[in-house]
Image: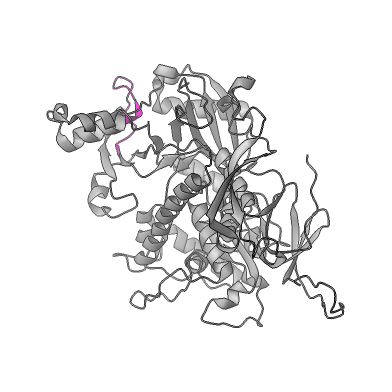
Amino acid sequence: EGKANALPNFSKVVIVGGGMAGLHTALALAEKINADPSQVVEKKYAVESNRSLWKKWFRRNDKKNKMQQPDGKRKTPQIQHSNQNKDKPEQQIIVIDGSTIGNFASGRAKGLVVPGFQVPLEDLEADAVDHEGYCDTSIPAVLDSIISFLFSEPPAPKYTKQIVRDMYDMTYEALDRLRHIVHRYEIDCEWVESGSVEASIHSIEEEQGENENAEGSDKTAFLSAEQVNEIMGIPEKNCKNLYQGGEYDPGCAGVNPLELTLGLADAAESLGVKIFEYTKAARIERNRDDNDATAATEYVPPKGRFNLVTTEGQVVRCDHVVLCTGAENISNKLSRRLAYSFVPIYTWMAATAELREECPLKDGVVDSVIAKNLTGSANSAKTSGHEADSLTKKPAPMCGDDHVSLNYWRRTPTLVQKKFKRNEDNEGRILFGSLADTYPFPKWLISWRLRYALTEVYPQLRDVKFDHVWGGKLAFPLNSMPLIGRDTDYDDNTQEDIDGMNKYSGGGVWYATGFAGHGIVPTAMAGSVLANAILGIPDYSLDEINNVSHHQRWQLFHEYFPPSPWNGSPVSRAGAGSLLLVYNL
């Protein structure tokens, strides 16, 4: 283990958690407070971090293929700070993490850059109060009522379809922001604009007419079972009619999540954010110290509304704390509202041996299938030379299905145009993820179950070996929606409500967690909306017609999808595991 560095006496904002949510929040705050975007210089920046997580197969053991310059230093852009705010403690932002950056869920993620949430938009709309045929007897509504009764808390207010549509639209804005971040800060994270295919084990014929305006970009295309099998490379002789159809969204992408996480840390540090690894938060205390006795001639550091205390006894004063920890246990001393708000779920991934030309996912296949769908197979030969050339350039798509345990897979990208070249010979491995367990199991059992899930999709790969298997814990809220908001237990009656939001910018405890394995894009959204909340920036229009009176976007999640006060503990894991087993059967 590493050793924690000394924390500053005061920081305007302390972010707990060095994953994507925490780093996006830090970066968004730093951009709004400290950055001078007109000045960008290139700087060699040394990063000391264990990059073996995602994964050893991606960086061969021989030194020739390491993603490093000859001097061993990593190149990242350095954004110069505004001289006005750079060194002021009242503008400082720090991130603390109990381990190393990207060591948990963010660095072990599946790498699918997909907007939206774990809960599909059509499912959220079905529970909207203005949905035709709405009734409050759905499973989420019943659970909410029972928990509210047991804990004497009012249930979450009912939302409209427009509310959840606005929330989904926010994730598409976040996808654009994520692309901008990767481009602006030159984050080398194997970003591949490949689109995604979601296959369905259910019939989608009825859904096509009902959900024309549901989640997905404007160019989303519905696929037949034959098209899904062709795109995914499932031979007709091996096809067992597993998938009944699907849809293709060209607006999605693939990424190396560990390198993205480390790149976000680089970008945040280049703007003055300070990151402290091996520093675990223990508790949050209200700060009632008095500085009046300090001599007037001495520098008086800002008092701060809170004291954040680490497990090693370090104390940092701050005005804002943002809790971005994942499935690791959050104690009552940090937040009673989050301590029992989700169930930890284990999920797993594997990297196959090199498949090369035998890899079922091929570049250009999606375009040819879509072209046949639009022009007809008889006319496909008449495609112009420019269009025909473009068909060969679209990378193999990210893939997934709608099993309860959500199988997801992709091909390792061909990176012939990257600044740091590697994998140029196209190893053609399949990265396959699946399973949802409430307890950790032995790796041999995990490998066997992953192989079974893989061969269910690709029977021709039954003899292919796994070179690497890894996994981790995800934070799953009871409603599977991300937890974004403010811990009102730390609020007091002295905060005045000035135009409905300035009372929040004075200080508070915030949270962004529980992304349920669907966080690469929503964490970028969460970071932006919490940065606006902390700085008191309005980012949501008032809408009297739809009875929306919020000034800021974070309030939508805070009000309509709050943390549950109880996750079923002490039988939460057993209960969730039983439900998953029943659904899978």
**Image quadrant of residue 85?**
bottom right
- Give x and y (percent) for residue 449: 52, 29
| Above or below 357: residue 76 | below
Q: Is residue 512 visible?
A: no
Which residue is depicted at the point 59% across and 59% down?
30
Judge by depth and name the residue closer to the eye, 285 or 477: 285
Task: Note whether residue 18 is visible.
Answer: yes
- Magenta residue check for 238: yes
Residue under the point 45% across and 54% down: 174
Residue 384 lies left or right of residue 88; in this view the side is left
> Where residue 522 sits: x, y (%)?
49, 53
Eyeballing the image, is 335 above or below 377? below
Q: Is residue 109 magenta?
A: no
Q: Quadrant of the N terminus?
A: top right
Left or right, residue 176 beside residue 508: left
- What residue is shown at x 53% (from left), y 73% (from top)? 154
| Secondary structure, magenta segment, majority class | loop
- Name the spot of residue 238 as percent of width and height, x first: 33, 21
Answer above or below: position of 567 versus 376: below
Horizontal and vertical percent for residue 172?
40, 54
Q: Which residues are magenta?
A: 231-245
Quarter holding the C terminus is top left
Question: In front: 172, or 391?
Answer: 391
